[in-house]
Amino acid sequence: MDRFPVVFVPHGGGPWPFVEIGFPKADVDRLADYLRSLSAIPPQPPKALLVISAHWEEPVPTVMTSERPEILYDYYGFPPESYEITWPAPGAPSLAARVRTLFDEAGIESAADGERGYDHGTFIPLKLTYPNADVPAVQLSLKRGLDPAEHLAIGRALAPLRDEGIFIIGSGMTFHNLRAFRDPRAAPVAEEFDAWLRESMVQDAPLRDHRLEQWTNAPAARLAHPREEHLLPLMVAAGAAGEDLAVVGFNDTFAGLRLSSYHFGSA
């Protein structure tokens, strides 16, 4: 089996592609088209998806173990149809168990959650990528404290899954300051931080990972991410990438703000 790539993707805001919530249509279309294209990146159909969502934090990395995860509508204040979106992908308890074994081997404490459902960091983007919901999926939480080095290490522990037919997807945002959305003064901030991030991500792995560990030193870092939970899935993806170089998979604006995605190990 060919080695699978790893990706980090921006998942947009709330139920954005499926419910009209005021984002410019051209922006919605460009990001939605990109997310639809992701299914063509793996060399063959994946056995399962492992998704690291920005919207789940636990004291230790935690995996979903349900065979039939429900939908967790973890957004608020949207039209009623936002709470009727479905994405009935099956779970993958065997993958969850494999993830925990890899963590054990790496000396990383972990946990399981049999009740957690797919949050919108998973079901919104992946309803575009895998609209038939026919690929099993497991969500993995972030670790509270949001330490970049720890999340790089979590990703490194997961790297063997790439040789086992598992498509690892980090789901977050390269800009996430909710107070700044729809504020024209935020656009230069997003541009400045995204330029630093793009330049950092295409470096050789040791320098890339070092810069990610030190991301708070970047220009406009805390203006782009007052809290870094939406950036940490990128750390996990970079760790799982190992020595593979990153390429920019998507770089465009969404609601006037610069966003990017990264692919590792793709052709």
Image (cartoon, grey):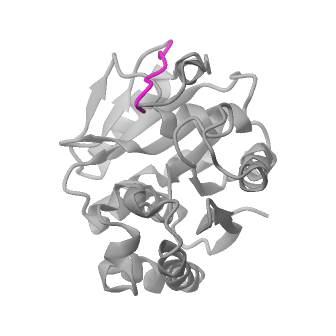
| Residue at the top extreme, as displayed | 68
Quarter of the image with the C terminus is: bottom right
Q: Is residue 24 left or right of residue 216?
A: right
Vertical position of residue 219 compared to residue 147: above or below: below
The residue at the point 51 percent across, 41 percent down is 51
Residue 72 among those drawn in magenta: yes
Q: Is residue 175 left or right of residue 11?
A: left
Q: Residue 149's x, y, as percent?
A: 29, 68
Vertical position of residue 246 compared to residue 65: above or below: below
Magenta residues, start to end: 68-76
Residue 49 among those drawn in magenta: no
Q: Is residue 4 left or right of residue 121?
A: right
Q: Main secondary structure of the magenta part?
A: loop
Vertical position of residue 188 compared to residue 165: above or below: below
Q: How many marks?
A: 0
Quarter of the image with the N terminus is: top right
Q: Nearer the viewer, residue 86 or 243?
A: 86
Figure quadrant of residue 250: bottom right
Q: Is residue 123 left or right of residue 100?
A: right
Q: Nearer the viewer, residue 9 or 150?
A: 9
Q: Is residue 43 visible?
A: no
Q: Is residue 125 visible?
A: yes
Q: Residue 104's x, y, as percent?
A: 27, 43
Q: Residue 96's x, y, as percent?
A: 42, 29
The residue at the point 53 percent across, 72 percent down is 184
Q: Residue 241's x, y, as percent?
A: 54, 63
The residue at the point 57 percent across, 31 percent down is 123
The residue at the point 62 percent across, 21 percent down is 87
